[in-house]
Amino acid sequence: MNRGGTAPQSEFQDLMVGKNRTGSLLAEAYLGPASSLLYGGVAVSMVFFNKAVLSVYDFKESNVLLLLQMIAAVGVLVLLHAGGALVLEPVSWHRAKALVPVALLYNANVAFALASLGNLNVPMYNTMKRLTPSLVLAHDYVFSGAGVSREVVQSVMLTVSGCLVAGYGDLAFDPFGYAMAATSCILQASYLVTVQKTGAEKGISSNDLLLYNAILSIPVLLLVVLLDGEFHPAMTKLYARSAEFNFMSVLLASLLMGILLNYAIFLCTQNNSALTTCIVGVLKGVAATGLGYFLLGGVKFVPLNFAGIMINLVGGTWYTYIKYREKQTRSSGKPAFSV
């Protein structure tokens, strides 16, 4: 009797274990693509939510927007930490002091990027932002004597030439917007070089880094918006539109997108290969550029401008592929040729 009753029970347990394993494998199979879509979707959405606040709703006070984003970042991170959703290290003033230069460069870059986004269309904004690697490359070559492969030089030249062609064909050419975008690229390159040289961000999680950046930037941004006269008109606009559901929804999304993007990048990196993350990074640029021609008023199609954007996009994609390949070559210990 016992033997007869045990066999079916054992078969049932084996069946349930097999089903659980199958379910786990299916979950893992979908986790990678889902996290990639989340990263790409959030990155693209962030550009358009910021653009909508700045242009569609005419909230031109970009420094106030950045200040609100930093305040929201601190508030959400602290709440999530208090609720046990994430772990934050205790704030160290020694660490904060070391992070001051990179935090200021990071936020200055974002501030100028928002100012440029308010004056440029989305395709041209993305085109200009692809110039950052060329500035980092120029710095490394001039000041560090770092060898640069011929392919990297060619891809950078293609990216820069595409930007020049696109700018020449831009009928809505805005000198202020282009100046802000160029300054943002310089600041972003300076930020990347500073991080590379000082190693200030080593040993710190992305959430802690976001918290430090926000804490260190809030006093500076508050001083800036008070001195440049943005504070009063921004508060007047916020009060006047506080009952508008559409505006407040878009503004809230804009404030929270930075934190969500941070989490999406973490998930994408954790659940996929480095190559997948690089590819998603390229594809989000393609998607934002394409959608920029149709969303939020769109962009008038000009063949020369479109050709320049495509050249820039190809150059940026090629550069990303080359840098990934060089990284893999260094990891395998094979020599990389340079000029």
Image (cartoon, rainbow, N blue to C red):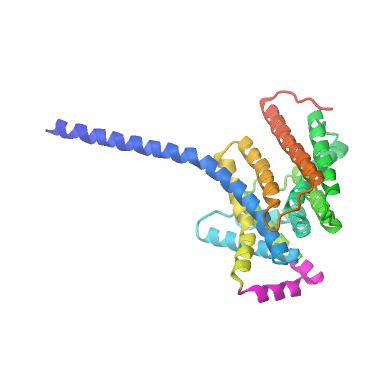
Q: How many marks?
A: 0
Q: Determine if the magenta segment contains residue 77.
A: no
- Is residue 202 at all visible to an observer of this figure? no
How far from the left and from the top, in percent, is residue 298? 71, 55
Front residue of 36 and 211 = 36
Occupied quadrant, residue 5: top left
- Give the position of the C terminus as an image quadrant: top right
Q: Please, which residue is most extreme toward the top here? A: 334
> Which residue is located at x 19 percent, y 33 percent?
6
* Magenta-drawn segment: 222-243
Occupied quadrant, residue 306: top right
Q: Is residue 79 above or below residue 205?
A: below
How far from the left and from the top, in percent, is residue 290? 69, 47
> Which residue is located at x 70 percent, y 30 percent?
325
How far from the left and from the top, in percent, is residue 23? 40, 39
Front residue of 109 and 191 = 109
Q: Is residue 136 above or below residue 1?
A: below
Front residue of 172 and 45 = 172
- Is residue 184 at all visible to an observer of this figure? yes
Q: Is residue 25 above or below residue 267?
A: above
Q: Is residue 129 above or below residue 83?
A: above
Q: Determine if the magenta segment contains residue 223.
A: yes
Q: Please, which residue is most extreme toward the right here? A: 142
> Which residue is located at x 60 percent, y 74 percent?
243
- Give the position of the N terminus as an image quadrant: top left
Query: Most prominent secondary structure in the magenta stretch?
Result: helix
Front residue of 298 and 127 = 298
